[in-house]
Amino acid sequence: MLNKGISVEFRILNDKDAQEIHDRYLISDNAAYNTPPWNIIHKKLGDIKFIKDHVSKRYIFDKYWSRATDISKMSTK
C-alpha cells in the first residue's frame, strides 16, 4: 500500500479505553464510517454506515488514538 501512497497504522487500546468503545471505525481526514467487525465482514451481511459528523468523531478518535499502543512497538514474546 505504501507504494501507492497509502499509509496504514494499527494500534491497540488500553483496557480502560477498550471497555468504552465497542464499534469499529474507518476514519480518514475527510470521512468516517462505522463498520461491522472486520474479522467477519466477509462471512455475514452487515452495513457500513457513513457518519455525517466526521469532525466530532475524528476528535474522539484522536483522543483514544493518542493513548493507544502502536503494534509495531509491541513485543511478540
Image (cartoon, rainbow, N blue to C red):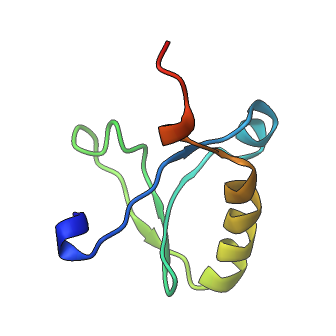
**For the image shown, how many numbered marks are present on the structure?**
0
Residue 12 in the image, given as x and y percentages of width and height: 59, 40
Residue 19 shown left or right of residue 69 in the figure: right
Query: Residue 46 vs residue 32: left or right?
Result: left
Task: Indicate whether 10 appears above or below 34.
Answer: above
Give me the residue at 48% from left, 40% from top: 72
Residue at 55% x, 77% y is 51
Residue at the farthest left position? 3
Residue furthest right in the image? 16
Look at the picture and state if 32 lies above or below 65. below
In which quadrant will I find the N terminus?
A: bottom left
Q: Position of residue 16 (x, y in %)?
A: 82, 36
Q: For this rendering, which residue is in front, 25 or 42?
A: 25
Using the rendered view, name the quadrant where residue 38 is placed: top left
Q: Is residue 59 left or right of residue 6?
A: right
Q: Residue at x 52, y 83 (%)?
A: 29
Q: Nearer the viewer, residue 32 or 50?
A: 32
Closer-to-camera residue (68/43): 68
Q: What residue is at 30 percent from the left and 45 percent from the top?
A: 41
Give percent across and percent down for residue 75.
Answer: 53, 23
Q: Is residue 46 above or below residue 1?
A: above
